[in-house]
Structures are given as structure tokens and as C-alpha cells.
Image (cartoon, helix red, strand yellow):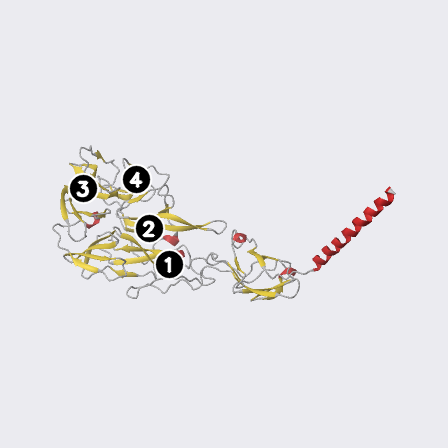
Amino acid sequence: MTKLFKYILLFAAICCILPACKEDEEEEKVSSGSVRISAFSLKADTTLLDNLENVFFTIDLENGLIYNADSLPVGTDVSELSVKITTENASYVNITSPDGTFNYIDNTNKAINFSNPVYIEVGSQSGKFKKEYKVTVNVHKVEPDQLFWGIMQYSSMPGSGTLSDNYTVKFNDLIHCYMKRGEQYVLATATTPQEEWNITNLSLPFTPDLHTLRCSDTAMFMLDTDNNLYTSVDGTTWESTGEQYAAIIGNFNGTMLTLSKEGETYYHDTYPRNEGATLQPVAPDFPVSGFSEMLTYNSSWLAAPQGMIVGGRTATGSLTGAMWGYDGTTWAVLNNTIPEREGAAFFQYLTFFVDDFWITEEKTTWFVIGGLNETKALRDVWISNNYGVTWEKAPMKLQLPGYILGRGYSSVILCDEPLNTTYQNWQSLDTYTVPQGSRSIPLYSTTSPTLVPYIYMFGGENLSGVAQNQIWRGIINRLRFEPIP
């Protein structure tokens, strides 16, 4: 009886298992209706480009679009690329390129010509559905990280008459362009340089040294040719402070850093002077004239803000290219890489770095442009991506183009403006434009304009002191691209 009972249990178990197996077999026979491409990438080819396999492709299932929003470098040959395509058990993946049609499933290593858009038709396993995708491998038509000045345009300095001196600053959100035209000192103001300038003839009670012009948050400061300090809160009315200084360095935490001179010795000083303070003599290699405007920055890892100047002439008249830094107490040489010069333009901008995974990182970058040495007006560009710890001569894509002459004592102002704006009353040296579709797939749209920082370089002078009567407008190309969707 016990043996019979065991056979009955075994029979019952088999009866339970068989229907389940049958159900599994029937489920496996149900074909997939998916036509989705779940992954798309290029295969590695180091003879063509490093890290090609890491290029990210967007798959827009709704619109049937596959594309790399951040384009490949200029000049990349895309006529023979192999791809990796992942589907959900598709019955066929037909790829149509300028060179013909083939089934990817039968030949996964076949090279494809992406010089024009390629079309992929995916058929479902069930045979009931199919979907077409348009694949575009985008390649930059222009160098994205070039600092471009051509169609960015140029204009004459505002006003009329022979320009013999000039210096420009930004104060109270207005550009203040001081000029000497003929025998008249002139102030031109505007929010941005393409607007109509408001020009005022100045009646100054002194002969200004325009290169000494510096600003705080509340006032402007300038020396006359006898080293008397004058100040203004509106840019047109200037009053004497009753103080004399050898030089104005710049604003630091609301105090104007200056240099004073007694006999042949220069001292670090301030305006207003600290009562009872003992003035410290400057180091022999510290510049007492011709240094750049002071750039100030702060960060969470600094104990105090830092102020920096570049270049200039020492008390003995020797040129220097060193960068000096001030921490609120002490001046020190932070770097001595940049070749010697005076009148260099020193400003903060940005550049971009693309890593091995084609991720573009924006970097805060300090720029030094031009200046004068003993033999010529310079036009070289130096950059630092680590707040002045190290400097290097900028790559060619960031150097000034040949049609911009070397100059010293030019002024650089940054203005946020809508991307790809040009001005009919400004001149251009070429017809360069960012090609349509460099970035926008699908087309980028917005209800408000995208603002990007344009560089405006005002005037300056050559080695003989002849004023340069132009405003140049430039930008990093990548900033002009439509944002990645």
C-alpha cells in the first residue's frame, strides 16, 4: 500500500509539471514586437581617433533620431566607421548609407559611410512592426575652442578726432572709455559697446595719466602727471584728494592699494592711508609702473581673497613678467613664467576641456594678452587654468589672429550678450559664421535669449606710443553653439 501511494504522488507531480512546461514553451513562442534600438555606439579605431568608442549618442525614440550632440573634432573622417547596435531581438536591422544597404545582424563589423545621414530600419521579431531611425555622426565644421575675432567684428573707438591716448574701465555697470582726441579729453559711456555712445567733453582741472585709472565699488581714481590723486563718483566730475602717490594698484576689499615714494624708495601704501601704519618698502623686483590691472578672486580653500598683478617695470626701470599676489598682508611672487612686459591685459575668462569620455568641462581661465617689451608691441596670449599657479603659452587656437596688431595698455571688458549677435555698424574681416546645425538636433528653442560672454578689447598703443583706434570683439566658438538638448 505504501509503494502504491508513492506512485500516486509521483503521477500527481508529473501532471502538475507538464502543464507548466507547456505554458513556458508557448510563452517562448510569443515573438517580440519591439523595434527599439536600446544602445548605439561607434567601435574603437585608434588609427582614426582615440576614445572613439566613448562618444555618447542620444537615441530619440519618439522622433527616430540618433546623433552625437557634442560633435567630433574638426576634420574627423567618418566615411568608414563600424558601429555597435543593441536591439530587442529584432528580426533584421537594415542600414542604408551612401554606399548601399546591408543587414547589420548578418555583418556587425561592416564599415559604414557616415559622411551623410544614415538610415536604420529595425524589424520586430514578430514581423508585425518596423521603425526607421535617422543616424547623424556630427563633426565640428569649425574649431570649437578657438578664440575667434573675425566676424566677432571690430569698430573704431567712439568719438571723432585724432586719438592720442585712451583707457577703458567698467564702473557702475557702465563702460567708461576715456580718450584724448586732439587736445580734448573725452568720456564715452555705454552699457555695451554696440549701443550708441554718450560722449561728453571733459573739463578736467588736471592733466590725467589715463593708464593709472582704477575703480572701487563706489568711486573711480586716477593720478595726474604730477602724481596727485583725484577721485570721481560719476566719471565726469573729478576732485583732488590732496594726496600724492607714485602708482595706483587696484581695489582690495574696499581699500585702494597704492604705491608712494620718498626720495628714491617706493613703499606699499593705501588710500585712504591707515593712521599710524608703518609703510613697507617694495621689494627690488616689485613693479612700480606698467603692471596690469589687479585681478581679485576668492574661494572656499583660501583663507583670504587674493589680488594679482602681472608684469611692469621695477624701480630701476627693468621689465618683469612676474605675477605678484597679495593676501591682505603680504605681497609675494606667485609665478615668473610669462616673459617680461608692461601694459599687459590681464582678465578672467573661460576655456573648455574634453576628457577621454567626451565630456566637456568648462574651466575658469586667466588670460594675459600682449603688452610692450623693449623691442616690440606683443600680441602673444598666455593662460592659466589653476588660478595662476602655473602659466603656459596658449595654443594657436587661443592666440590673436594675424590681423590684430600687437599692443600694450589695451583694456578688456566682458559683456554678456545674446549668442550669435552681429552689428551692422561694425566691420568684419571675413564671412565666418557658426554652421547651422552644429549643435541643434533637434532644433534648440527657448523663450528667452541665451547670454554668453563676449570679449571687448579697447584701444591700447604700440611701442612708439601711437594709440590703436579699434575695439575688437571676440569669443570662444563653443560658446556660440546652441546648448546641447
Q: Of callouts 4 and 2, which one flags the residue occurring earlier in the amino acid sequence?
A: 4
In the image, taking residue 234 as reference, residue 15 lies left or right, namely right
* Quadrant in the picture for residue 125: bottom right
Dot 2 corresponds to which residue?
A: 380
Residue 323 in view: no
Dot 4 corresponds to which residue?
A: 325
Give 48 or 455, whichever is nearer the viewer.
455
Q: Of callouts 3 and 4, which one flags the residue occurring earlier in the amino acid sequence?
A: 3
- Give the alpha-carbon distance from disc 3 to disc 1, as whole Å: 44 Å
* Furthest residue toward left: 205
Dot 3 corresponds to which residue?
A: 246
x%, y% of residue 155? 27, 61
Dot 1 corresponds to which residue?
A: 450
Are discs 1 and 2 less than 8 Å apart at CB?
A: no
Please tell me whether mark 3 or mark 1 is closer to you in this view.
Answer: 1
* Quadrant in the picture for residue 249: top left
Please tell me whether mark 4 or mark 2 is closer to you in this view.
Answer: 4
- Give the alpha-carbon distance from disc 3 to disc 4, as whole Å: 19 Å
- Give the alpha-carbon distance from disc 4 to disc 1, as whole Å: 35 Å
Are discs 3 and 4 less than 8 Å apart at CB?
A: no
x%, y% of residue 243? 14, 41
Q: Of callouts 4 and 1, which one flags the residue occurring earlier in the amino acid sequence?
A: 4
* Furthest residue toward right: 1
- Position of 351 relative to 60 (above/below): above
Determine crowd level at label 3: few under 14, some 14-19, many 20+ residues with C-alpha closer than 10 A. many
Residue 305 in view: yes
x%, y% of residue 182? 15, 58
Q: Quadrant of the N terminus?
A: top right
Determine crowd level at label 2: few under 14, some 14-19, many 20+ residues with C-alpha closer than 10 A. some
Determine crowd level at label 4: few under 14, some 14-19, many 20+ residues with C-alpha closer than 10 A. many
